[in-house]
């Protein structure tokens, strides 16, 4: 059924209807022991893949589609290199490679040259129907058909929910929301988008919401061949949105023939009903939290709380609430006791309400790490989150955070690279991948990673913050100061940026300016995290005050203390027995 078709799914049928039109098939061509698959763009002999350039496969495809017919060189070149000027030698080279590959085993000439006319395929060709299995997909931003621009957040929220559902499947690589959203309203072709996102299959569609009714229309396409594989429309009530999204995801998984374990099948069968207004408020909260700004976190908290006032059993809203408070403590200097005091009950409630909620376990792993310094629990919760959603970059990112602070550098790098592979255009994923290099003292690679992120978005302070610290460890003081000044100019209200600039200035010999900025920092903020002050004192070569500031940070149980084992800034303190004792207090060995 086309995306605009009509089909009413009542609540009971959403969860129990037998799927239709789910196996994606296409025609392949067989001759002798060979099979040419147009969709996969592959040639096999007795099921063994033959290595050929993509253009050679396309030339062969033009020939086998019309066996026995002479096809001119001009016609083949126009089909294989459309609207592109190429020399005839390119076609000759592809034919040479094809003859070499096809004649290597049985000494037959499948391609005949007809002088002054072109080429002819000489063998009998059988056309067969073959199923296909795909292992990578991107869900492009669903189009808002409500006619109300203010409902864009809803269409984006449904897009993210489908990505989250598909991310539960271990055998499927699903591109994250952040990267997919870059192509919202894009005029690029499907093949261009697929190449950029490194996927085989793209899901397009639309969302139309009218009062409490909802229609989701989707179409699945194979990008390389520009072939539409499957289309369907789903109607339901907003209160059934969770079940409806799971239903769409199950049909997609079945359609692309992804391998599905029994546990994953259970995860894709959601039966909970959510209050429509609570769901809309939750989507607004997710939208604000994604901005990763101080104001965005506070707006998100308001939306999540409003959602929970309407639906007190909404686990995802509790997880979102907990994450916001953790971000405020970790990135924006909120008093840890206050922030974690609010985050902990929300995170625990989220997992209690839904044991299979991956983001609940991911945020709980952060809480156990940053607040409790319980490394075993953080390890366990982060692994559980990946088990539940192996295709979600967020859970791999949080796993990487635990690993890098535990001093497991190679594993941390792998985890962050996995997150980036799932979200290749995410600035956060790219930026975060720089930190395990930094903590592993691989400063050159850290600088390269932070620079790559800054080139994509030169207006985000966090990118220059990481870059400045990595440059400082390379003794590239002027470059480090320049990067950190950029960070402070972009976000002058972030005390961490100010503290890091003071550290670098002091370390670079600009003691007077460093002390002047320190006075301004004290006058501007009623509360300056003691961990920030310890960094400053190290930069000013006052190790006694640095140790004292860290002792005060322990009294406040500041979250950044988990980085003591790996933070290069504190290398001048490592010979001090008091510092070694601090590592044990935070649950780590020296």
Image (tube, rainbow, N blue to C red):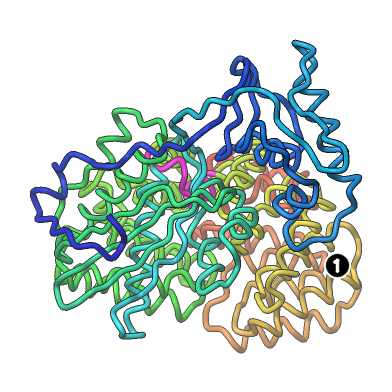
User: Which residue bears the numbered disc 1?
Assistant: 507
Image quadrant where one finds the N terminus: bottom left
Q: Which residue does the image show at 47% across and 72% down from the upper left?
A: 334
Mark 1 neighbour density, 10 Å: few (under 14) some (14–19) many (20 or more) = many
Q: Which residue does the image show at 10% across and 54% down from the upper left?
A: 11
Residue 182 figure quarter: bottom right
- Closer-to-camera residue (431/51): 51
State left or right for residue 335 relative to residue 470.
left
Query: Residue 131, position in %: x, y?
Result: 43, 31
Query: Can residue 312 be seen in this snapshot?
Result: no
Q: Which residue does the image show at 91% across and 73% down from the upper left?
A: 478
Q: Which residue does the image show at 35% across and 75% down from the upper left?
A: 144
Range drawn in magenta = 388-399
Q: Based on the picture, tell me whether residue 392 belongs to the magenta stretch.
A: yes
Image quadrant where one finds the C terminus: top right
State left or right for residue 198 relative to residue 95.
left
């Amino acid at each position: 059924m086309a995306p605009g078709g009509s089909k009413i799914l009542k609540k009971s049928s959403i969860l129990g209807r037998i799927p239709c039109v789910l196996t994606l098939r296409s025609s392949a061509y067989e001759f002798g022991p060979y099979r040419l698959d147009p969709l996969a763009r592959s040639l096999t002999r007795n099921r063994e893949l033959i290595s050929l350039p993509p253009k050679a496969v396309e030339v062969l495809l033009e020939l086998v589609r019309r066996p026995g017919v002479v096809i001119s060189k001009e016609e083949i070149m126009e089909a294989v290199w459309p609207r592109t000027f190429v020399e005839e030698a390119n076609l000759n080279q592809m034919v040479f490679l094809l003859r070499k590959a096809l004649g290597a085993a049985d000494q037959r000439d499948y391609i005949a040259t007809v002088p002054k006319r072109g080429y002819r395929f000489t063998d009998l060709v059988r056309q067969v129907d073959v199923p296909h299995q795909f292992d990578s997909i991107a869900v492009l931003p669903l189009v808002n058909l409500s006619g109300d621009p203010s409902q864009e957040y809803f269409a984006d929220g449904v897009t993210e929910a489908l990505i989250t559902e598909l991310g539960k499947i271990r055998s499927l690589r699903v591109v994250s929301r952040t990267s997919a959203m870059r192509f919202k309203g894009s005029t690029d072709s499907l093949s261009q988008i697929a190449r950029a996102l490194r996927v085989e299959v793209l899901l397009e569609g639309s969302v139309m919401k009218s009062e409490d009714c909802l229609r989701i229309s989707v179409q699945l396409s194979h990008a390389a061949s520009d072939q539409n594989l499957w289309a369907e429309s789903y109607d339901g009530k907003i209160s059934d949105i969770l079940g409806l999204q799971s239903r769409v995801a199950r049909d997609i998984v079945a359609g692309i023939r992804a391998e599905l374990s029994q546990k994953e099948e259970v995860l894709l069968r959601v039966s909970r009903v959510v209050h429509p207004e609570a769901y809309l408020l939750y989507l607004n909260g997710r939208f604000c939290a994604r901005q990763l700004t101080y104001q965005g976190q506070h707006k998100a908290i308001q939306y999540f709380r409003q959602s929970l006032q309407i639906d007190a059993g909404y686990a995802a809203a509790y997880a979102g609430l907990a994450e916001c408070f953790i971000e405020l403590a970790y990135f924006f200097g909120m008093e840890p006791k206050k922030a974690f005091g609010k985050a902990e009950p929300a995170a625990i409630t989220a997992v209690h309400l839904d044991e299979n909620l991956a983001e609940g376990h991911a945020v709980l792993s952060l809480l156990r790490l940053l607040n409790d310094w319980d490394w075993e629990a953080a390890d366990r919760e982060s692994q559980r989150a990946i088990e539940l959603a192996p295709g979600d970059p967020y859970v791999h990112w949080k796993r990487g955070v635990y690993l890098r602070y535990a001093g497991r550098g190679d594993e941390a790098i792998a985890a962050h690279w996995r997150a980036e592979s799932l979200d290749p255009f995410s600035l956060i994923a790219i930026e975060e991948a720089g930190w395990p290099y930094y903590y592993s003292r691989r400063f050159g690679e850290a600088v390269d990673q932070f620079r790559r992120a800054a080139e994509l978005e030169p207006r985000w302070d966090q990118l220059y913050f990481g870059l400045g610290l990595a440059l400082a460890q390379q003794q590239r003081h002027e470059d480090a100061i320049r990067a950190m000044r950029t960070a402070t100019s972009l976000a002058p209200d972030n005390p961490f940026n100010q503290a890091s600039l003071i550290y670098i200035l002091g370390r670079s010999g600009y003691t007077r300016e460093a002390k002047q900025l320190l006075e301004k920092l004290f006058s501007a903020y009623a509360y300056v995290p003691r961990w920030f002050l310890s960094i400053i004192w190290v930069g000013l070569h006052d190790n006694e005050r640095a140790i004292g500031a860290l002792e005060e940070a322990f009294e406040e149980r500041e979250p950044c203390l988990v980085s003591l084992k790996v933070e290069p800034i504190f290398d001048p303190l490592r010979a001090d027995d008091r510092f070694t004792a601090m590592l044990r207090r935070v649950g780590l060995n020296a």
